[in-house]
Image: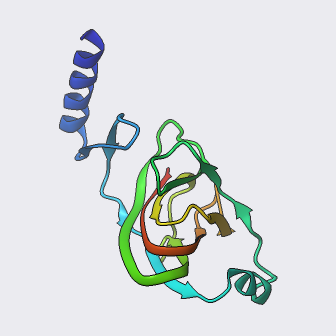
Amino acid sequence: MIKLLSIFFAIISLTIATPVQIVEVSDNKLQLEDNPVPLDAKIVLVDDINKFRAAHPDLQFTELVRSEKQPRNSIRYTLGARVVGDTLVATKSDFASYGTAQNVKLTLTYPTSGTGAVVTHVLVDVQQSSNVGKGYVTAGGIGQRYIQIVIEAQSTTYFGYSAYIYGR
């Protein structure tokens, strides 16, 4: 109870000092959120993901960490870690469904223009009908002011995602 009151008064103090919103994130922790910018995101269907890789041999693929401890048909991809002073700087979500199983490629780019914050942590929650997929950083990354992420999903009849990029 004392911890909850401390959090409440800390939130009240922050709310008076700075214009922020209170949101609850999936790990049930309260998160203070500035006004994040939308990510540039594009979902495309691909015939063969390996052909995409072969067609782009110059891309450096840094694989995102995939968490298997998610509900059925959910995959969580992460990179980096939350650090003191970082905030949610960009977010985007979308959902699409297909009549037959498809291979899907999602490309996320931050920032959409200009110079972004220094990226500290990336979290992408994906919902898809299959459990076959991978996530990669294809440009920029943690500690840089730019990041491009590709999420691949194979043989899925639907694809949804919620992406969060933190930085300072």
Q: From what the image shows, is residue 108 above or below residue 135?
A: below
Q: Nearer the viewer, residue 82 or 56?
A: 56
Could one spot residue 75 in this view of the protein?
yes
Relative to 7, residue 24 above or below: below
- Image point (50%, 65%), residue name: 116
163 lies above or below 76: below
Please report the residue visible at 62 percent of the width from the left and 52 percent of the height from the top. 66
**Quick one: quadrant of the N terminus?**
top left
- Front residue of 43/12: it is 43
Residue that lies at the very extreme toward the top in this rendered image: 2
Based on the displayed image, in which of its 4 quarters is residue 46 positioned?
Answer: bottom right
Residue 123 at least partly seen: no
Q: Position of residue 100 (x, y in %)?
A: 46, 84
Left or right for 144, reference 108 = right
Left-right relation of 128 to 67: left
Relative horizontal placement of residue 38, taking residue 51 as reference (left or right): left
Q: How is the image coloured?
A: rainbow
Identify the residue at horizontal 32%, vertical 48% (top origin): 33
Tally the marks: 0
Q: With 75 as the anchor, is 140 left or right in this view?
A: right
Residue 2: x, y in percent? 26, 10
Rendered residue at 53%/41% (across/down):
82
Q: Position of residue 159 (x, y in %)?
A: 44, 71
Quadrant of the image occupied by residue 58: bottom right
- Residue 162, percent from left and from top: 41, 61
